[in-house]
Amino acid sequence: MSDGNGERRSGDRVAVGLVVRLKHGNIDEFIERFAVNLSPGGMFVQSRSPQPVGTEVRFEVHIAGGLPVLRGSGTVAWVRPEGVEGPSGMGITFTVLDPHSQTLVERMLALRGAREPGTVEPGPGQEAPPPASRSMVDTTTEALAAQLGDLAPAEPQPLEEQEVVLDFDDDEVHDATPPEPRSPVPAPMDPPPAPAQPLSEPDLELDIDVDLSDDEDDALDIDVDEVVDPHAPPPVVFLEAPETIPEIGPVIGIDLGTTNSCVAVFEEGRPRVIQSKQGYNTIPSVIALAKNDRLLVGHPAKGQMLINPIRTVYGAKRLVGRNFESPVVREVASHFHYPICADRIGRAAVQLGDHILSLEEVQGLILREAKQMAQEHLSQEVHRAVVTVPAYYSDAQRQAVRMAGQLCGLKVERMLNEPTAAALAYGLNRELNRTVLIYDLGGGTFDATVMKISDNVFEVLATGGDTFLGGADFDNCVVDYLLGVFENNEGMPFQGDRVALSRVADAAEAAKVALSESRSHEIHVPYLVVDADGVPHDLKTTLDRETLDELHEGLVERTLDVVRDVLLDAGMRPDGIDDVILVGGQSRSPLVREKLALFFGKPPHPGVHPDEAVGLGAALLAASLGKVDSVVLVDVLSMTLGVGLPGGRFHRIIERNTPLPVRKTYSLATTRNDQTRLEISVFQGEDEHIAGNEFLGTARLDGLPKLPAGQVRVAVTFELGPDCVLSVSARNIATGQEIATQLATRGTPEEIRNRLKADVGASREAEQRATDALPSTSGRLLSFFKRMVGKA
């Protein structure tokens, strides 16, 4: 046997123990800086005294505080001596990495854009070493999970008397005693397992003579120098919106979810879910910017969330179409790792690296991914889609979804409420005559809808919901509990960074999913916090089903409160519901099923897939568009629509649960001589004050004839189509002439309240009511998020 220098070696080969000590302060810094020393087959270690070629080594790479980030074994493949261009050192070909180290290497290679199998780059005059024993190129999380399942850690090998310690930043090699064994870095989180044009209702004409002037003659005649159209395409960073979208080709169905999205098509007589490139029936609704500024969407984006949380956008569906200064956005912003800011007209947007992205673009990137999946499946271009939205979405949010489709080159032919889509998947073409309740508890929103199904006529009787109640809130309860356990067990408060908190959130979600099938689950998050003395502290506990139910019971009861209100609006009792249909991943919770069975006196109906029903329903509707003999949908308005009055009062125009489509008209008159413009502020919500409702925009009526005050009367018509999208028109009552009308927005809700001279005290009370209606956040978790703003 010979070593790398051709000398004979006597006795068995003994692996050299290497400890590479780096000065990187945290894992993020290590990933960003050390990635340049990696290739798919191994790594380069800088040293003034490299080991000979062929030397077998067992290595550990430590960062500040002694935290081990890589551990495994390998062989010195080549050396670069001093005096040669570049730093001296050695290239080590990996033989075995422990599973956690392999996962981290995969992530780092993905971030630097590695694509092809390879080995450590050879030094000058060196031949390329043979490739590593297993490929480390497939960076998809599900592939990693498969690989980790059959990768056994290296068998312990005897070390020589002293380990060689390499201090990378100092270029020094010196002897050291073996370090204490430490727990490996945990693996990043894996993705969850996969599991005709409607007939129009008659227009409802309602003439309402409303005195909007009150005591403020000029309250509705405010000159605005700049009015920004809220539906104009926002500036884009990663998308290239086409000038025109062809209205040809197949129509696909897309469930644009908070946590996961699903795309389906109708073929061979039935709807079919399209699988992602990774083989899943859903894709995570996540986008991210890798450290090399490469955009990731779906599974790759979620796969690096743990190590790159500040540049990973998730849950955007909760914020899209909302004003940045609204209580809703202020509350949600405290939960997310990534920065939330305002766009050019005051709507919520996100910061991704150096870019400011509108939430329409974020949603558009997810829609583009779904579109590309459909195009690959169908082998043709796709330009049209039916996209689902929560039933409780406002008009502004629905318009934002339509804009997201436009940005990615999709014409949204119809927006379909998610519960209605699930009902289609349940009952279309089954010749049913039943009354059902759709219980839709997804990742970020909850909807409850009572629906009457008669053959292929689907009539919504009442709907309600909460756009801030979903699986994420259930996860937060578990995170809060686990952090409390950590504090009690370790006798110290949790002071980790965003990466550490992401690891806890990952463990919480995994435990929640596991407890849907088992009675208890072991949770172990190693090396969660390093104290001031450099001692690592793990989170280790057992969570059982009973404790989980206690944590979640309050949230489930909140969903039942919504169910009670919806039944009341529909004029029904629980025993009048024939079937309860469960939709959304969180509806798999045993507690949810037990509570619903107790409430309705019967178990929920098992006939639809919680993750796929909405997408399949969208595909069914897409297939029926344009057909005479097709499905008939009668939906309802989820939130009351009205206008702001002087003083800040809210005047209701169209009440919630009004059947769609609907048209209602009211009249108003000029309040000044020669007045040529009227402006009406439009809001949506249930509060009696505009401050408690959502501002949709301002309907500006231009070109009025110059006449004395009160002699020009205008009929303003609000019209909502089948997909609940608002349009506003106006006409001169005396002449019948159409008046130029533009629904636009400018400024913040505060500025709108100032225009209407809203009562300050009443506004504050309404804002407090809106804030109180939001879900309460676990205090410990919220404080951590706030404390970590700006931390690495």
Image: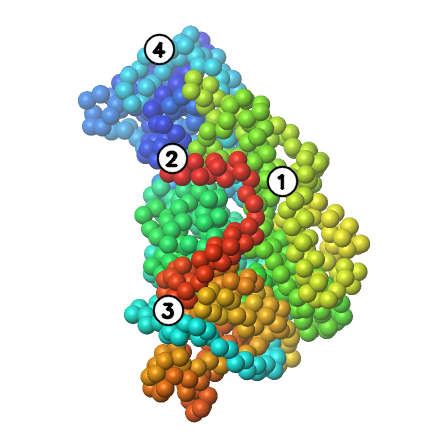
Q: Amino acid at mark 3?
A: Asp
Extreme front residue here? 215
Q: Quadrant of the C terminus?
A: top left
Instruction: Mark 3 vs mark 1: give the one in front.
Output: 3
Would residue 619 appear left or right of 497 to someone viewing this image? Answer: right
Check residue 512 in the rendering and tell me which mark sits there, or answer none: 1
Q: Amino acid at mark 2?
A: Ala
Distance of label 2 from label 3 (alpha carbons)? 38 Å
Q: Is residue 146 visible?
A: no
Tag 2 residue: 792
Viewer-proximal residue, 578 or 697? 697
Q: Is residue 310 visible?
A: yes
Pointer 2: residues within 10 angstroms few (<14), some, or many (20+)?
some
Pointer 1: residues within 10 angstroms few (<14), some, or many (20+)?
many
Q: Secondary structure under badge 3? A: loop
Q: Amino acid at mark 1?
A: Lys
Would residue 539 appear left or right of 122 to someone viewing this image? Answer: right
Viewer-proximal residue, 10 or 344? 344
Extreme bottom residue here? 735
Tag 3 residue: 229
Tag 4 residue: 175
Residue 388 drawn at (x, y percent): 55, 63
Q: Secondary structure under badge 1? A: helix
Instruction: Mark 4 vs mark 2: give the one in front.
Output: 2
Would residue 581 appear left or right of 212 to someone viewing this image? Answer: right
Distance of label 4 from label 3 (alpha carbons)? 69 Å
